[in-house]
Image: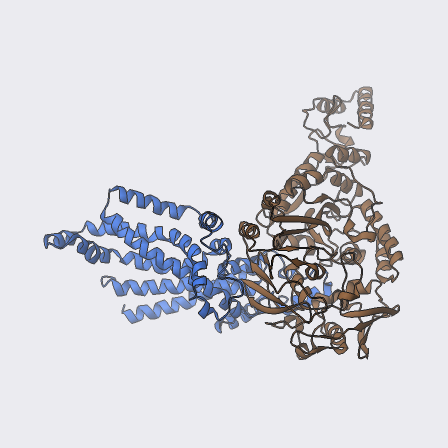
């Protein structure tokens, strides 16, 4: 199979995957017990008013009618209006997603730079105390819940030492657009703690993969050849071993990044970070179907697309990979 | 052990001996071989008073107590588990089902698919308006509000009379009678009286006065606060983001009401004694012209955008809400026929001839926000309108809304009842420990949400923290489903109320901040409340005795059976 055929086939699969995810989401939320209007109505509303709200949500239409409308709207990336705020879901996503992306990407970049670097060293210095300490740290980072680490960090550095803000993305009444604010020192100051906690958690994954990959590469003959050629240890480590060991990291990173976007709920809660994860959970709990569907679709799309990118990247980076 | 039951058992044994019936003796042996686990087994003669099988009615069915998740509301979750344990002690076969809040609410309030439920109910400005929804026989249809299934024509009549009665004194008598009936029939058990809570940093702000409907988050509270030490920002918080800035499009949750109450004026306001106070109201005078007409004299005032607030705006607001069938004000709309401009400063609100409302000022006048006609006239579906920057005439005006992060309201200097602070900021902070750190340091001025938890208990004695409580109009109700066998009997409900450990709940789970409940109309309602109602002693033993007096019988496992046929 040619590369072009492979890409076309994967694109078609993408379409099917999106349809399947959308359908599951649609059904899932409608199968959930509980009346979405119970969160929208006031206890003092009359039954007629409650009915009026149900009608306005379109929840009285037959399921297949709702489904067709959902698919039609989804094709144009229109997920409807929030039951609670009456804002278009696109607008809700646009409000919260950028905050999550900034936090996630910052943490991700830090985690992968540190994780890969430490992974290279632990693979290289196998059997030393350094390796043992680093591996234990990495396993600990992956094992301890992020919210717990977050609370400890807040307690020590926020409440105790007062060097980090306790909550939010900025100080009261910060002016300017979102773009102008994220480059202020205030925003960066608020970003440090949640990003560090997340980076600590994410770091373990690339570190352990890189270490394994390094050990595999270091056992190959070409490393001996490099040594025989008289290359320096540093050159062998970074230029030859690390580069060859990088492939699993790149593909794993693409997938992990997708999950990271949706996996920030606890950190967003602990640090009062107004992100999409928190909003997604709130939408589910309050039966705000449009927002829940929209946010889940965004997260699913991130994972699906990054998987697709990983597939393509793999073939591009490793000429040995065929498309059969 | 109730003496009459001992006698009853002896009578039974005598009867069994006389007849020498094998079955009877076997049953008696089982009875005498009591393992001590039975309810009321607290003296030498104790043990469940077990009669022959043919003297036991059917066992009461298993009851499911719906509980919210621990993470949603920890104290309530713990309280439900405790109550269910006590109901087991009472001899009821209990199961606790933990549900996510939306599902729980739907099961109870819409589907009536439950046996016992418990949550925090908020009566706003008048108790009967709420009771009419939850207790009136006409509302027992699915989703209509009367989830307990309570039906009593006498109570219906009292509520109907009350809502149509313009005379205060007569209304007080009516609502007192209603309370007596409700506490006799006990369709709803007031388990805990929840207080209004003011928790604040006393180095920053002082003079907290609560009002009846909104406690320490009210209009009255805000216009009376005194900032200290040059502080000019009142900083509060809420654990979750606000949904909307549309005063007609929210769901009446406190997080919205507490803000719109300050952004928009209503024609009349109440003070902390529950009296109408024209000094702080848009109306400088009001009069009930006849049974179906209220007249208000409106003061010279402006909206936040500088436009004059006129009587036309007042009339527009009332007519607009009625004509557009705004769901949020659907109850109030039932009592509004039309608003009419009389002259430059007078507006009349006409009620329907067949549905006049006695406490119109309280239930409608204090509730309807006065909207600027020039902003709203062109909106066809006001409850669905997207409002980014609300324009009202209240003491606080919209400054900024960083959705999901913060809301800023600035002082409206031209208001007739100005606040003492320059800005009120609400930050969105989900984590309680962060809030408390802010309170201790003064970064947060007051605990807006009113969380009662361990951190409150641990911090309330700090020098810079002051905690005030006032009786509130809200309480935790434990409501049995009166449609279910056994729970349709007031004696079972009363025994269950006896068994609810109200004092341990308030002292242990709620850290002594709340009080045990004893009436569905709390003392916060002042003269509307009466203490002349049937009260119920706490204790499982009291409940057991009550059930036995009512003819219910215990088997050897300590489970309650219906009286024999």
Q: Position of residue B270 (x, y in %)?
A: 77, 61
Residue at x 53% of width, y 60% of height: A279
Residue A123 in view here: yes
Q: How many marks?
A: 0
Q: Nearer the viewer, residue B437 or B481?
A: B437
Q: Position of residue B397 (x, y in %)?
A: 64, 69
Q: In the figure, the brown chain has which letter?
A: B
Name the colour assigned to chain A in the rendering: blue
Q: Is residue A268 left or right of residue B323?
A: left
- Residue that extends furthest to the left in the rendered view of this protein: A229
Question: Split into 4 quadrants, where in the image is the C terminus of chain A?
Answer: bottom left
- Residue that extends furthest to the front in the rendered view of this protein: B229
Color theme of the render: by chain
Q: Is residue B382 left or right of residue B20?
A: left
Question: Split into 4 quadrants, where in the image is the N terminus of chain A?
Answer: bottom left
Residue at x 68% of width, y 72% of height: B414
Answer with the quarter of the image where residue B37 lies. Answer: top right
Q: Nearer the viewer, residue B562 or B431?
A: B431
């Amino acid at each position: 199979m040619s590369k072009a055929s492979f890409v076309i086939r994967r694109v078609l699969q993408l379409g099917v995957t999106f349809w399947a995810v959308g359908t599951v989401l649609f059904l899932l939320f409608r199968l959930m017990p509980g009346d979405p209007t119970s969160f929208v109505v006031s206890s003092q509303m009359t039954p007629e008013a409650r009915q009026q709200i149900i009608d306005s949500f379109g929840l009285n239409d037959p399921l297949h009618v709702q489904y067709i409308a959902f698919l039609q709207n989804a094709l144009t990336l229109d997920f409807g209006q929030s039951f609670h705020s009456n804002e278009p879901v696109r607008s809700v996503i646009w409000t919260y997603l950028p905050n999550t992306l900034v936090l996630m990407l910052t943490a991700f970049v830090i985690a992968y730079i540190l994780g890969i670097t430490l992974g290279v060293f632990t693979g290289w210095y196998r059997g030393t105390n350094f390796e043992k300490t680093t591996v234990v740290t990495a396993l600990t980072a992956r094992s301890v819940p992020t919210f717990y680490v977050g609370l400890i960090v807040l307690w020590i550095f926020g409440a105790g030492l007062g060097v980090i803000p306790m909550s939010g993305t900025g100080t009261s009444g910060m002016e300017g657009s979102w773009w102008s604010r994220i480059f202020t020192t205030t925003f960066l100051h608020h970003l440090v703690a949640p990003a560090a906690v997340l980076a600590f958690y994410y770091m373990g994954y690339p570190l352990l993969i890189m270490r394994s990959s390094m050990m595999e590469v270091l056992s190959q003959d070409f490393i001996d050849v490099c040594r025989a050629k008289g290359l320096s240890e540093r050159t062998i480590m970074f230029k030859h071993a690390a580069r060859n060991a990088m492939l699993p990291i790149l593909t794993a990173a693409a997938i992990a990044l997708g999950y990271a976007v949706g996996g920030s709920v606890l950190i967003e809660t602990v640090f009062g970070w107004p992100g999409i994860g928190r909003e997604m959970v709130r939408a589910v709990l309050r039966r705000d179907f449009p927002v829940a569907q929209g946010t889940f679709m965004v997260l699913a799309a991130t994972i699906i697309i990054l998987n697709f990118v990983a597939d393509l990247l793999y073939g591009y980076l490793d000429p040995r990979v065929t498309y059969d | 052990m109730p003496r009459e039951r001992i006698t009853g058992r002896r009578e039974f044994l005598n009867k069994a001996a006389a007849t020498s019936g094998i079955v009877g003796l076997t049953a008696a042996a089982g009875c005498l071989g009591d393992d001590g686990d039975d309810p009321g087994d607290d003296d030498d003669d104790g043990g469940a008073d077990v009669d022959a099988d043919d003297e036991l009615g059917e066992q009461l069915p298993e009851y499911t107590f719906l509980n919210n998740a621990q993470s949603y509301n920890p104290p309530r979750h713990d309280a439900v588990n405790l109550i269910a344990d006590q109901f087991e002690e009472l001899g009821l076969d209990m199961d606790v089902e933990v549900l996510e809040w939306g599902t729980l609410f739907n099961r109870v309030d819409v589907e009536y698919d439950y046996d016992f439920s418990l949550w925090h109910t908020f009566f706003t400005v008048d108790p009967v308006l709420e009771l009419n929804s939850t207790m009136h026989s006409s509302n027992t249809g699915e989703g209509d509000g009367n989830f307990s299934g309570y039906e009593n024509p006498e109570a219906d009549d009292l509520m109907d009379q009350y809502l149509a009665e313009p005379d205060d004194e007569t209304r007080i008598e009516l609502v007192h009678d209603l309370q007596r009936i409700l506490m006799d029939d006990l369709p709803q058990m007031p388990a805990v009286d929840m207080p209004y809570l003011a928790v604040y940093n006393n180095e920053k702000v002082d003079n907290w006065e609560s009002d009846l409907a909104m406690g320490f988050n009210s209009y009255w509270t805000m216009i009376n606060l005194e900032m200290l030490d040059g502080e000019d920002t009142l900083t509060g918080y809420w654990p979750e983001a606000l949904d909307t800035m549309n005063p007609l499009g929210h769901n009446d949750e406190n997080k919205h009401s507490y803000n719109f109450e300050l952004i928009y004026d209503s024609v009349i306001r109440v003070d902390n004694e529950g009296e109408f106070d024209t000094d702080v109201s848009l109306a400088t005078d009001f009069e009930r012209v006849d049974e179906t007409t209220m007249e208000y004299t409106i003061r010279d005032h402006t909206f936040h955008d500088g436009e004059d607030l006129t009587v036309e705006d007042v009339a527009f607001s009332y007519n607009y809400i009625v004509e557009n069938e705004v769901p949020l004000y659907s109850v109030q709309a039932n009592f509004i026929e039309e608003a009419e401009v009389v002259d430059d400063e007078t507006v009349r609100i006409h009620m329907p001839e067949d549905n006049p409302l006695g406490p119109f000022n309280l239930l409608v006048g204090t509730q309807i926000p006065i909207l600027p006609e020039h902003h709203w006239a062109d909106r066809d579906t006001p409850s669905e309108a997207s409002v980014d920057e609300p324009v009202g005439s209240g003491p606080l005006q919209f400054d900024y809304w960083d959705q999901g992060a913060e809301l800023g309201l600035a002082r409206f200097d031209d208001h007739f009842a100005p606040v003492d602070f320059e800005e009120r900021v609400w930050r969105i902070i989900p984590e309680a420990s962060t809030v408390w750190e802010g309170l201790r340091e003064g970064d947060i001025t007051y605990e807006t949400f009113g969380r009662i938890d361990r951190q409150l208990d641990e911090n309330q004695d700090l020098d810079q923290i002051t905690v005030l409580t006032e009786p509130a109009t809200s309480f935790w109700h434990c409501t049995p489903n009166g449609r279910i066998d056994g729970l349709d009997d007031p004696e079972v409900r009363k025994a269950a109320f006896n068994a609810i450990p109200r004092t341990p709940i308030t002292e242990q789970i709620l850290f002594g901040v709340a009080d045990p409940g004893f009436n569905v109309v709390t003392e916060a309602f002042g003269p509307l409340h009466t203490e002349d109602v049937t009260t119920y002693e706490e204790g499982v033993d009291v409940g057991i005795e009550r059930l036995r007096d009512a003819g219910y019988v215990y088997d050897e496992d300590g489970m309650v059976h219906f009286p024999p046929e």
